[in-house]
Amino acid sequence: MTTNNYPQIIGLCAGILLLTSLLMVWRHSLLASIGLLAIQGAGLAALVAVIGAQTDDAELLLAAALVFAIKGVALPWILARQTEATTRTINESPHLNPTASLLLVAGLTILSYAILGRILVDLDTVTADAAPIGLAMVLIGFLLLVTRRRAGSQLIGFLLLDNGIATVTFLTSGGVPLFLELAISLDVFLVVVILYVFAGRMRTKFGGTDVDTLRELHD
């Protein structure tokens, strides 16, 4: 990899991360969102691998393989298996319509550049310039958590938020120690497995995972 094409490759990987985040907000199919989550995990792994190759850091290359295995393969596979076991397509009506959601995504992305542009003003590097994408992913993840009704879709928002945090970390600090990335990834994996079992119990007992409906039952 040459120094000249390094910024373009970083920009391409960051663009994939932002595009998949936007499509997760736009698409209402849970299976489609899971597929986008797998693409995003692969994009994040590619981003880490590019940084590792540029800096000649073998630990970052191992971290990239770990990110791909957990975020790009294992977690989407678990979610897809749970979804396909119940129904082929799960669509929902979020609290916001697609137009309003996309406008919010645009606003959150602009806000991310405004915030990190001031914070990282002294870090004049290629990776730091792309860091606002990670913050935008965090904010979009919160948006999904707030606006989606089903527990499965909210779990997608949680994983998007986690991917955003990892993106900011790798772009601003050159990554984290491999053992720490392994611990964090395993924690997220455990949380998803627990929520996977919990969602299955909710569906068996109440016939669905619509949070608003469950709140009405509580009331």
Image (cartoon, rainbow, N blue to C red):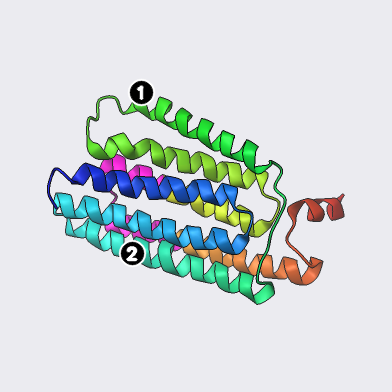
Q: Secondary structure at mark 2?
A: helix
Q: Position of residue 104 (x, y in %)?
A: 58, 34
Left or right: 79, with 207 as reference point: left
Seen at 27% across and 42% down, the residue is 173
Residue beneath disc 1: 118
Would you say residue 144 is visible in this rendering? yes
- Specify which label sits upstream in the sequence, 2 or 1: 2
x 36%, y 61%: residue: 67
| Place of residue 55 in the rendered image (x, y in percent of width and height, measured from the top left) | 15, 49
Residue annotated with mark 2: 66
Numbered disc 1: secondary structure = helix
How many residues crowd around disc 2 within 10 Å: few (fewer than 14), some, or many (20 or more)?
some
Does 155 sit left or right of 36 as displayed?
Answer: right
Rendering quarter of residue 69: bottom left
Report the residue at 38% width, 29% height from top.
Answer: 116
Q: Is residue 54 left or right of residue 40?
A: left
Magenta region, residue range: 165-186
Query: Camera-side residue: 195 or 78?
Result: 78
Which disc number belongs to residue 179? Answer: none
| Residue 185 is a magenta residue | yes
- Classify 137 as above or below 186: above
